[in-house]
Amino acid sequence: MDKTITLDDLEKILTDSLSGDMQDIASEALLSGSLEIDVSEIDRTRTPKAVRAVGEECLLLAKKFMNAAVLLGFEPDDELRALAGAGLVHPDADAGSYRDRLSETLAPAAFEPRDFPEFRMPVQEVRLGAKRSEGGSRSKTITLGGEKTMPYFYDNEMPNRNYVTLDVFDMPVGLAKSVKVNYEDVMEDPAEWAEKAVNEFGADMVTIHLISTDPGIMNTSAKEAAVTVENILQAVDVPIVIGGSGNPEKDPEVLEKAAEAAEGERVLLASANLGMDYKRIADAAVRHGHAVLSWTQMDINSQKELNRKLIRQCGMSPDAIIMDPTTAALGYGLDYAYSNMERIRLAGLTGDEELAFPMSSGTTNAWGAREAWMIASPLEQDSGWGKREFRGPVWEAVTGLSLALAGNDLFMMMHPTAVRLLKNITQTLRGKMTEAAGYEKTEEMPGKRNETAGRGSADPEDDWLTAVFRSGNEKDHGEKQWKQTVLLTFIRIFRMSVKKCTAKRKWPLPRIWWAAFILLKIFRRKSPLWWKMIRLPAKRKKRE
């Protein structure tokens, strides 16, 4: 069946539907006949002439259809008439002059930043971590919140960037293969796990999950969990998050002991919720100077209630509360999680004091989606899913990026590639790509460790190992490399011995000081920094 229409057909339709003088007008407007392009006199080797001929015929066709539109009652505006009557542009014409003529036809537009009068309350700023001058031992702190509008608006710059905390567990756990390959060499030692997360993968913070304290797993005591927290604080110098096992009966006791062990470090206790003794956790946070993660299950009213109780009943300061409204993974309720977070952020900005707090996302929930870790779909009719080594990190990153647009500030993540992707995109949206690596004033990307920086230090100028090598007088590069290798080997052995002794509360001094003696003999020089090699656990003040 012929589904085409020619100018003759169009003329017939109009003449049948019109009467009287309008039929003559229609025939004159359409110029009956089939539109043909005469190319008999065109040299096909000279493309510009052919292009011009085709262009002239196309313009003629456009004018005919414009006349037809007028007859049907659609009057073209002045701008369209001007374009139809404009002269043709030759193919070999100057491109610059053509762009100049084209720009004259565009409507002028200028971007002017504007205020949002409906956003009358900024999000509360919450600082995590404490430096030595503040009674802690962190090399840097982070600040969440402070936004005056929704994220990544040019009108109001975000005062603080998004941050990522990598998950660490106090015992080996089952992980997706693409995640496990990054940590399988350190899963037996939480402190080593935390070091790797910070030094190699660019984590801004680490979250230690004390899952072994669950009575259904290992039922580790709160006192033993506190020792693990101390080891983590010794291993890294970034702010940390302390999480329990999820057991509502055991977690308050565990987080209370952990808060005492981390006194002065201003950690984030995760978490308090309405289904447990939140008052006990909040009291421990107030007593030892920490912040609390206020966790609810995708219910804005429950979030308001818990925040209100933490402030009014427990006496917590607003600058010590971070919300976790619960994260659902991509394909498993992400749209609902997004809507909930967006509602919370909009309510806070428009004046709801009980919701004007920074938000945290358990982005690792993305690994609960089977599409993130399965090799392929169990359904034969499904299309290919692609390699899970790429699919999993993208699944986690997309989950986090979606919630970043809803106003989320802190992301709890696992895969290093997902961390790198999320940081790069969020920092690009803020227009500050140089900070995407997690370390300011550097172009180094996460996952590529600075070769001049020592373990646990983000600033080479403040790193004792770099200072030791810089102060040396090695005459040969090979000798320097040999000493560096031997030194790092002995330091690793020595620090592992110290950590094991700390956990067992036993100190075989001959073995420890023998290792320290060898470290000193390697360099055979007097250095005021030698004592930093030992890094014995710091004595912490006990609450009287």
Image: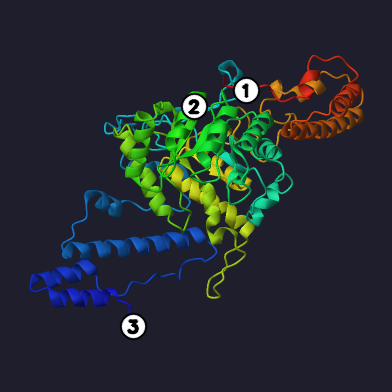
Instruction: Determine which residue is flagged by label 3.
Output: 2
Q: Earlier in the sequence, mark 2 or mark 1?
A: 2
**For the residues carrying marks 1 and 3, which lies nearer the camera in this image?**
1
Tell me: residue 515, above or below residue 218. Answer: above
**At 80% across and 33% down in the image, what residue appears?**
497
Instruction: Find the distance from the CA under tag 2 to the CA under tag 1.
Output: 15 Å
Q: Which residue lies furthest to the bottom in this view?
A: 1
Helix, strand or loop for disc 3:
loop
Residue situated in front as seen by the camera: 19 or 426: 426
Helix, strand or loop for disc 2:
strand
| Label 1, residues with CA under 10 Å away: few <14, some 14-19, many ≥20 | many
Instruction: Determine which residue is flagged by label 2.
Output: 127
> To which quarter of the image does residue 63 belong?
bottom left
Q: Tell me the kind of residue under disc 3.
A: Asp
User: Where's residue 477, x and y in %?
Assistant: 89, 28
**At 88% across and 16% down in the image, what residue appears?**
525
Q: Which of marks 2 and 3 is nearer the N terminus?
A: 3
Residue 500 appears in the picture as rendered: yes
Residue 137 shows which numbered tag? 1
Quarter of the image where the N terminus is located: bottom left
Tell me: residue 530, above or below residue 498. Answer: above
**At 42% across and 34% down in the image, what residue appears?**
279
- Which colour style is shown? rainbow
Q: Do the residues labelled 1 and 3 touch (CB within 8 Å)?
A: no
User: Where's residue 233, x and y in %?
Assistant: 64, 30
Badge count: 3
Q: Do the residues labelled 2 and 3 touch (CB within 8 Å)?
A: no
Residue 99 shows which numbered tag? none
The reply, left or right, for residue 4 in relation to residue 186 is: left
Tell me: residue 461, above or below residue 384. Answer: above
Q: Tell me the kind of residue under disc 1.
A: Ser
**For the residues carrying marks 2 and 1, which lies nearer the camera in this image?**
1
